[in-house]
Image (spheres, rainbow, N blue to C red):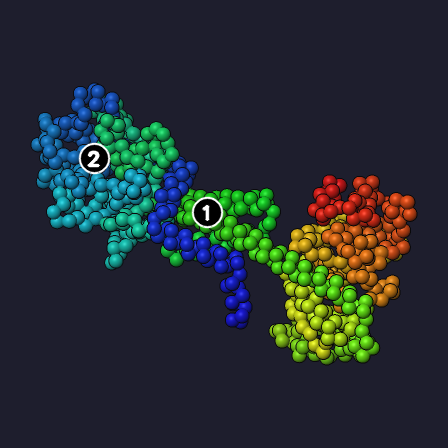
Amino acid sequence: MFAGAKKLFTQPVIVTSVLVTLILVGVQRLKLLEYFELKVFDQMMQRRADLPPDPRLLIVGFTEQDIQELKHITPTDEELDRLLGKLVSNQSRVIALDFFRDIPVEPGHAKLLNRLQKNNRIIAICSTTTPPPPGLDVNNNVGFADLPEDPDAVIRRALLFVNPEPKTPCQSQHSLAVLTALQYLTETTKIQPQITPTGDALQLGKAVFKRLPPDAGGYVAADNGGFQILLNYRSFHNVARTVSFTDVLNNKVNPDWVKGKIILIGATAPSKQDIRNTPYATGRQDNSGKMPGIVIHAHIVSEILSAVLDRRPIFWYLPEWGEVIWLWGWTLVGALIGWKIKHPLFLALVGGGALVFLVGSGFIIFNQAGWLPLAQPALGLIAATGSVVVYTAYYEKLQRDKIAYQIQEQEKTIDLLKSLLREGGSSGNEANSPVDSQPQSGQLLNNRYKVTQVLGSGGFGYTYLADDTKRPGSPKCVVKHLQPAQKDPRFMEVARRLFNAEAEILEVLGQHKRIPQLLAYFEEKQQFYLVQEYIKGHCLQDELIVGKRMEEAEVINILTDVLKVLVFVHDHHVIHRDIKPSNLMRREIDNRIVLIDFGAVKQIQPHQEEESLTVAVGTLGYAAPEQLMGQPRLNSDIHALGMIGIQALSGKIAKEIERDPQTTVLIWRDQAKVSDALAAILERMTYFDYLRRYQTVKEVLEDLDKL
C-alpha cells in the first residue's frame, strides 16, 4: 500500500500540479494576482445580463441642466425643502437625501432642518469627515455615505454597518443604503433585521447576508472592516427610473412614480465630482462606466431588496481551502494535458479548450452569484502544462541518450558475440538441449514466477505463460526463456552484457501503451529470462490465412496501427529486427495491435537454418536484405511491415513472394486487388535497396494519410 502511495505521489503529473499550486498560492499571498482577479471580476460583471430597472426605486438627480436652470452648483436648503414637500405629498415611502447639510445653504436652512427632524421617513447623510445636520437621530434618520474603494479606486463592495470611533463626526452605525432598505422592509413587510451573535451575518427574512471575508473570491487580505458585502450591481445602464431635480419642482413627474417608492436624491452632474469608478468602467476610455454616488447607493438598496423580496442570489465564495482545491484541480488538468498530449497542435487546441472551459464555467458560476478565482487557475493550468511538457521533453531526451548509449554498447557486444560464435566452443561448453533446460509446468522461476503453460518454442528458447506469485491475485505474465548458444565464461560474460543492455532498452520502450511492459529480468542457472506484461488477444498470424485476401481498408488500418508504434520505437533509435505476423498481437480489450518480441537479444541464442526460425535476427520472408547480412537499419522494420501488407493483400506466404531478377521489385500485384496508390507505397516500403526505401515511418504514415 505504501509503495503504491509513494508511486502515486512521485508521478510527474501529481508532483508538478502540487508544486505549481503551492507556488501560485504563495504568489497570491503576495497580492501579485489580485489585480488580475479584480479585472476579471469586472469583465464578468460587464458581460452579465442586465436586470430591468427596480420598480421600487426612483432616483431624483441634480443634473447639469438643473445647475444651469437654478444658477448654482448645489440646491439651496429652501429648494431641498420644497422638493421634499412635493415628494412627501405624493406619498413617497422612504426618502434618502444624499446632500450634506451640516453647513447651511441659505435661504431656508431652518425650515429644512425642521422637516428633517420631524419626518422619520427622510434619511440624511454624514461621513467620516462630515457631521450630519444638527438635531437628527443618528440611529434612525442618518446614514453614512462612505463607499469603500479597492486599491484601483473601483467600488466593488458595500459597507452596511460600522462601529464608529468616538471622535468621528459621523456616529451613525448604518449606511444610507441599508437604513433606507430596512425602513422600506419594516413598513412594507414588517421584516426586522437580525444580526448573528458573532456579527458575521445579517438575516432579513429568509435572506442571509454574510460578512465579506478578507480573502473572498479574488481578494487577498482585503480591508473588510465593519460589515461589508460584495456589491451585486443590478445593471449597467438603469438601476431605477431617474428624473431631474427641477422636473420634480416643476411638477413634471407622474405622482404614480413617487407613490410608495423609495426616493434617492443626489447629484448626478459630472461637475459635482461625485462620479465614481465601478466594474463597468474597467477597460473603457470614456466615463460611460462610471456612476454618481447616489446611483451606487441605489444599487446597494436594490441588492438588499431583491435578495429579500425577489430571492435574487447573494454573492457566495469558496473558503480558502476550497480555493486551493479549485486551483489544484486546474493545475492537475494542465499537467494531465501536458503529459498525455504530445502533438503541438493538439496540445494547443486541448489546452486552449481547457482555458475556455475554465473561463466559461467561471462565468456560469458568476451568473449564479458565485465568485471563484480565474486568473490564478488559468495561470496554473498554463504553468502546469508547460512544466510537464518541458519535463517530458527533458526526460525523453535522457531516455533517448540512455538508449543510444545502450545501442552503441549493444552493437559492440553483438559484434563480439558473433566473433565468439564463429570461433565456436568446446563440446563441454555447448548449451544444454532445450529439453534439458525447459522448466516443467508448476515450476517456480526466480522463486516467484510459476510456469503454467508453454506458449511457444524455437531456436531462441521458450515462451511461457506464468503466474506472478508475489503480486496480489497472482496476475498472469509472459516469461521469455533465452538459452545462450555457448556456456564458456567469455561467451556468457558477453551474452550477459547484451541481455542486460536489451532489457534496459525494453524497460524504456515498455512505457508505450502498445508495447508490453517489462516487469523483470533475471539470470538463473546460466539461462536468461525476460518477464513481460501479458497481452490477452491473438497474433496477426491468425488473421493472415493462406489463400484469403484482406480488404485494402483493413490492410491500411493494420499498417497505420503498427507504424504509429514504430514512430515511438524509432524515435528512440531502436530497431525491432523481427517484425512478423506472430510478433503483432491483436489486443482483445481494444482490438489494437501490440508490438512484441524485440529481436536483438536473440543474438545470444543458436541460429538454425530452418524455415520457421530466425536467421541473423530476423525471419525469412520479412527480414530486409541488409538485415540478413547483419547490417540492420531503422527502415529494415519498414521492409518487414511492407511484406506483411503484401502478404495480407495477396494471400500468399511472405517467403514465397519472389523478386523480379532484373528490377528486384516483388512480384505480387497480379495476385491482389489493390489500388495503385497503396501498391506504390508497399513497393517503396519493400525495395531491395534500403536507400530507395522509405527512410522513416513518418513518411509512410504521411503517404497513407493521403489515401
Residue at 66% over, 52% down: 571
Q: Position of residue 381 (x, y in %)?
A: 48, 49
Residue 515 position by quadrant: bottom right
Estimate the spatial distance between the alpha carbons at disc 2 and disc 1, rounded to whole Å: 42 Å
| Location of residue 318 in the rendering, given as x and y in whole percent from the top left corner | 39, 53
* Kind of residue sitting beneath label 2: Asp
Q: Nearer the viewer, mark 2 or mark 1?
A: 1
Above or below residue 646? Residue 490 is below
Question: What element does badge 1 sit on?
Answer: helix
Going 48% across and 44% down the picture, which residue do you hit? 360
Q: Position of residue 432 (x, y in %)?
A: 80, 77
What residue is rendered at 79% in x and 51% in y? 639
Element on which disc 2 rests: strand
Q: Identify residue for label 2.
A: 98
* Residue 333 in view, yes or no: no
Question: If you read the primary sequence from the N terminus, does the residue marked by circle 2 or circle 1 appear first?
Answer: 2
- Residue 148, labelled with which disc? none
Would residue 529 be found to the left or right of residue 333 on screen?
right
Image mark for residue 378: 1
